[in-house]
Image (spheres, rainbow, N blue to C red):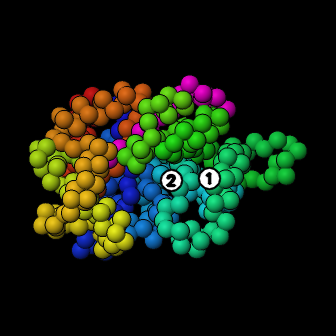
Amino acid sequence: MKLSILDQSPLISGKSPQQALQASMQLARWGEELGYTRYWIAEHHDFPGLTCPAPEVMLPYIGANTSTIRIGAGAILLPYYKPYKVAESFNLLATLFPGRIDLGIGRAPGGSAEVTEALSGQFLQQVWRMPESFEELLHFLHHDFPQEHLYSGVTASPRPIVPPQTWLLGTSGKSAKLAAEMGTSYAFGHFMSEKPGPDIMKSYLESFVPVKQPTSETIVAVSVICADTTEMAEDLALSGYLWRIKHLKGEGKEGVPSLEEAKSYRYTEEEMLMIDDMKKKIILGNPVKVSEELQKLQALYHADEIMIVTITPSYEDREQSYKLIAKECITKN
């Protein structure tokens, strides 16, 4: 089973943003040693407890401290940026780290309404023209604008020997349709979608047109916590649940709560129902149970790869979770 890492670079309560970003680098190094296929870091803006607003800035740091694992953004939020600038940045990364760079593209806001205004006063208009922007980006990356196009003579320098692999990330049928039409790889966010994911993935696979690459390629991103016992994994998940509840209340800027805080917190009936809903989107358990659940998910989606996001009350717990999963799902195969 091909497994990868999605890192939201969470701030753990009691730690500094610098420590959070250093932990992200360490996570990529551990992932490489453990045999994970790729490491992606996400883009968020003024999002309580998440520390990376600029994957293109973090990736050189990650790349310089690793040597073989594929690294990339999951995702660059294209409506905020000009396609040409994104192409330049990732062509530069692909030149520095040949054959290792992934460019994941998304269209979510990654923050509040005030954030979208601060970053781009025309965010919604750019969301509406996402298909055109995505197509333009692909032309810049592959240097294949039609001869009569305004940008046919423009190069997103430097041109790497191996271009970044482009992925479209999404949680709906719209993203799957666009990825299929443009002939790019597709990653579905199972951990953050209420839509019928397997049906959406099926539509991508059935509609794929080999425009930019010869065959389809798919990832399913899922939230997972693995521990020595299922009971321990369920305990560790409490911090993430409370963090999500605090975020919805406009709190949680100090980061992921400690396990002690999560256990002592007095949850309302409404909050308990929210937790029940969160449990539907996370895989928890000991290594054997997690492996079984990941295999079921892969079969359900017919996915080429599973990408794992893990939020725990400490960076050590996160490292241990990825280690246990790798030992059971990668090393044994």
Identify residue for label 2: 75
Look at label 2 and name its amino acid. Ala
- Residue at image coords 51%, 42%: 172
Task: Kindly state the secondary structure of the residue where label 2 is placed.
Answer: strand
| Residue farthest along the front direction in this orientation | 269
Q: Is residue 206 magenta?
A: yes
Q: Give the range drawn in magenta.
A: 205-224
Residue 190, image x, y percentages: 40, 42
Residue 132 visible in the snapshot: yes
**Quadrant of res 300:** top left
Taking 87 as reference, is 306 left or right? left
Q: Callout 1: few (<14), some (14-19), or many (20+) C-alpha neighbours within 10 Å?
A: many
Which amino acid type is shown beneath numbered disc 1? Asn
Residue 275 drawn above or below residue 184: below
- Picture disc at residue 91: 1
Q: Is residue 318 visible?
A: no
